[in-house]
Structures are given as structure tokens and as C-alpha cells.
Amino acid sequence: MIQINDLAFSYDKKEVLRNISMKLEEGRVYGLLGENGVGKTTLLTLLCGLKKPQTGSIETDGRKPFDREPDFLASQYYLADEVAPVALTPMEYAKAYGKFWNRFDAQKFAQLLELLEVKPDQKMNCMSAGQLKKTYISFAISCQTKYLFMDEPTNGLDIPSKAQFRKAVTGFTREDSVIVISTHQVKDLENVIDPIIILDTRDVLLNASIEEIEKKLFFDYGTSIDPEALYSEMVPGGCIQVKVNTTGESSKVNIEALFNAVHKHKDFVKELFK
């Protein structure tokens, strides 16, 4: 479990995160959403210990990530948005670097390369951006770490590859893992991420499971706009609207509409989910 208390971080005089508090529990795939510049990547690098909290604290199973103890580092993997095109084949890369994660599974790595249609004998510095990203995704998941942080993993992937990525996350990660995926491409991960975290400038607007969201909000797919809706948008064939759920009726969460509703009514939504 990861416990974040009153976390704050700034770059020189530019405050990025302020008073961030939340709990990240085992067996969950968290979707970390937010506009550009709200601190998603900064939060991930703080979680994995690449940066040190300036105020507040992060504790992962009672340990501080920035201490970067070797056995702690072996329990986590951070996949950055930009990855290095090294002059190794995927199998050579796995042999050279897999040893740093004591649960690295070479068999799973081979299976993931096959699932994601990556050639295991092609040099990584000769791959397309999409193939290179899929190689690193395969490696990250194959490390079988308890904590997996992924920054915009679907950037650069084509439509079939995004479907393969969803299969990789749901079918090959550990059941007890804490996975945090930062993304702008919410449709790519709509059936994978749960709970949803929405960051704003120096604030957490929402940290809730899909079940909690369904209880508090109703997603209406109709043909006429309700002026009382928190958010509404015309779509082909009708409209999508987000309303307060006053009847207890269940509905399918639309994450894009949820994001827009939260940003339109920040204080109201924060109070609703207290």
C-alpha cells in the first residue's frame, strides 16, 4: 500500500503539487488523469523515488521511496513516456537488465513480445517508436513488480496495439500489484483503469473507484439535453450527460465525460465524494 500525506513539490518557485493526500491500495489499476502541467509525471517520479518530497511524505509499505534501498527498487518499475533506443535486441536487453528485478519472468517477456507483435531478434535502436514502446511495456510487466508506474504508455501505439496493451495489463500483471497509469488517452484504458484519480493544479479533485462513481453520478445516454446536468455533450445519435445519481440507478461510466464534469464543477464534485 502507498500512503501519501500532504505532499508538496515545486520547481524553483513554480508550485506543482500541494497538499496531496491519498491512499493507493493493492490489486488496483489506477488511472491518473489531468491536464498538461498539473504534475502527473512529477507525482509518478516521486512515487518511485526519483524525486524527494519537499514537504509531506510518501510511504510505500512503510518505507520512503527516495531512500532507494536496493530490495525496495526491485519491487517497483517506472516506465517513462520516452524510452531509450538501445543497440540491443529485446532478448539481449532482458538478459542484461532483468537480473535487477528478482521476479523478472523471461517466459512472460517472450509471451508479451508475441502478444504485442514485437520481433525478439530486432535491434531496439532500429525499431519504430511504437515497436520500441511495446518492447519496454513487455519488459516492465515481465518484471512482475508489486508497484508499476507507467507514464502515457499508449502514446505512439496504433489501434490494434492499444487493444494488445489492455490484454497485457489485465492478463499478465500480478493480482496484488499497485499499478498507476498516467494518461491523456482515456478511451484507450476505459475498461482497464479503476479507480480514477483526477489531478488539478495542486489538488486532487477525485480519487474514486468505478463503483463509487456509479453510485454518486449517473451517465445518461439520451437524445435531449437536461439543463440540470453537471456536464452534457452532443455525440452521434444523441448526447452524453453526467448528472447526480438521485435514484441509485446504475449506468456505464464515460471517463471523458466524467473528467469534463469534474473540471466544470470542481468544488461540488470534491464535496460529493468526501
Image (cartoon, rainbow, N blue to C red):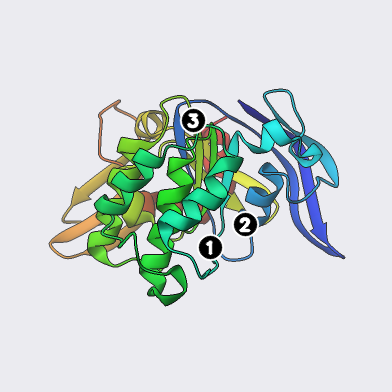
Discs 2/1, front: 1
Q: Secondary structure at mark 3?
A: loop
Residue 218 position (above or below residue 25): below
**Closer to the camera in the image, 202 or 106:** 106
Residue 235 vs residue 168: left or right? left
Q: Which mark is residue 217?
A: none
- Image point (73%, 23%), residue name: 62
CA gap, disc 2 to disc 3? 20 Å
Residue assigned mark 1: 81
Location of residue 40 (image quadrant): bottom right
- Image point (48%, 65%), residue name: 88
On the question of residue 153 being in view, the answer is no
Location of residue 55 (image quadrant): top right
Residue 38, position in %: x, y? 64, 59
Residue assigned mark 3: 177
Residue assigned mark 2: 41
**Closer to the camera in the image, 230 or 105:** 105
**Closer to the camera in the image, 86 or 23:** 86
What amino acid type should be assigned to the residue bearing mark 1? Asp
What amino acid type should be assigned to the residue bearing mark 2? Thr
Furthest-left residue in this view: 237
On the question of residue 126 being in view, the answer is yes
**Closer to the camera in the image, 199 or 191:** 191
**Among numbered discs 2 and 1, the one appearing first in the sequence:** 2
Looking at the image, do the residues carrying marks 2 and 1 touch, with CB atoms under 8 Å apart? yes
- Image quarter (top left, top right, bottom left or bottom right) of the C terminus: top right
**Among numbered discs 2 and 3, the one appearing first in the sequence:** 2
Q: Secondary structure at mark 1?
A: loop
